[in-house]
Amino acid sequence: MDALEALLRLQHAAGNAAWLRQALDHHAADHGNDAALALLESPRDAATGLTLPSGMAKGAGSRAAIEHAARVRRWLDGGPARSVLGWADPGYPSLLRQAASPPVLLFVEGQAERLWWPQIAVVGSRAPTPAGRERAARWAARFGAAGFVVTSGLATGIDAAAHGACLAAPGTVAVMATGPDRCYPAAHTGLKEAIAQEGCLVTEHAPGIDPRPEHFPSRNRLIAALSLATVVVEAAHRSGALITARLAAEAGREVFALPGSPENPKARGCHRLIRDGAILADDPDQVLEAVLGAAAEASGQLRLALQPALASGDLRADDDATRRVLEAIGDDGAEIDELFARCGLTSPTLAPILLALELDGRLTQQHGRYLPCCSASLTRAQVGRRR
């Protein structure tokens, strides 16, 4: 049994129990990625009092747990760019760690490093007005052009419009209410595949899990936790988007709501949010201005993720890593895939460095390409020729 097998079996037996996250945290200090394996092999720790609950070790060895692990392995082997991020994995998103009851496991398809990029959530009605749909796409495109990943829930309506406007780099994150091998709604199969190319699909549900009513509020908490801000474009008085907004506010994140006509029932949820303290926004740049301050604060938090790499010797120093990134960008700039190849850095290391350089005014992103700020602005045609 390897570390992933042990983690999958434990998670199946325990779900998202807080004690499991605590135990994995403790064992990761001594065993790194083998934390789950160490926990199964030594379920009692007299020094800390951490002990697997009665029957948990047996549950992790049950036929159901073994079949669960095998099913996940088949999914991992079934396509490129698929991964499982465990709680003790250094690639687990820092902002999500701060959420209430974060998942022990994340099932990811696409570019997992997008989970570390600064994100803005765009959510709203499943049956928006034509104007609302257009507004969601236009605002999402503006956020993407400013270098933010746009996050939403792969639902019809506002979600789909936001995702569709941000398929090009830096891409979009779709948080799913199903297993990673399912698509809900089924009509979004093509959109799901497109997001997996440039962006990222993420879910806390294992392969084979179909949508259930309780999954959608759970999905919304992940959207809120991953994002620096949540923008509600259109929402009826009773809407799942309001749950996302509430969870974002409870997590201390900015919440923006777009006002609408008093006669538009799709605007009533937004008006309610504004009455309850959400920020009224009538221009996407208002959101960007507010979020840049939050991004600066988050960059400090993300830099803490460098510490495990420093301790393990993956990086000699933060200054050295920054130098390597700037050298890799050079005068002509580089796309994210080129940076990974040139620097040899992992996504939890590279993402906060890029964010900090952008916030320091030393780096800019145009059409998915990172450029030193002294470079002349490039048109899309010039970027294409450089590729």
Image (cartoon, rainbow, N blue to C red):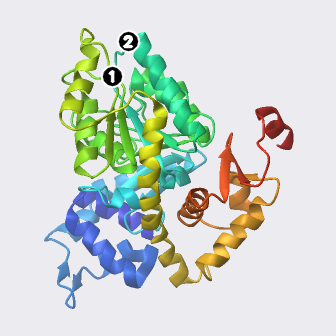
- The answer to whether residue 198 is above or below residue 136 is below
Q: Residue furthest right?
A: 385
Q: Quadrant of residue 113?
A: bottom right
Circles 2 and 1: CB atoms closer than 8 Å: yes
Q: Give neighbour class at mark 1: few <14, some 14-19, many 20+ (Cα, 10 Å).
A: many
Compared across the picture, whether 135 is left or right of 190 comes to left
Q: Which residue is mark 2?
A: 129
| Number of callouts | 2
Q: Is residue 320 visible?
A: yes
The x, y position of residue 217, in whole percent, is 24, 38
Q: Give neighbour class at mark 2: few <14, some 14-19, many 20+ (Cα, 10 Å).
A: some
Label 2: which secondary element: loop
The x, y position of residue 314, in whole percent, is 60, 78
- What whole-number distance in Å separates the C-alpha atoms at marks 2 and 1? 8 Å
Residue type marked 1:
Glu
Residue type marked 2:
Thr
- The answer to whether residue 211 is above or below residue 247 is above
Along the line of sight, which residue is nearer the eye, 68 or 222? 222
**Residue occupying the point 78% across, 35% down:** 379
The x, y position of residue 333, in whole percent, is 77, 53
Using the image, tell me which numbered label, if any, was put on residue 175.
none
Q: Which residue is mark 1?
A: 234
- The answer to whether residue 12 is above or below residue 198 is below
**Residue occupying the point 19% across, 22% down:** 237
Along the line of sight, which residue is nearer the eye, 120 or 106? 120
**Residue occupying the point 45% across, 54% down:** 295
Compared across the picture, whether 52 is left or right of 294 comes to left
Q: Residue furthest top?
A: 263
Q: Quadrant of residue 53?
A: bottom left
The x, y position of residue 312, in whole percent, is 53, 82
Compared across the picture, whether 262 is left or right of 384 comes to left
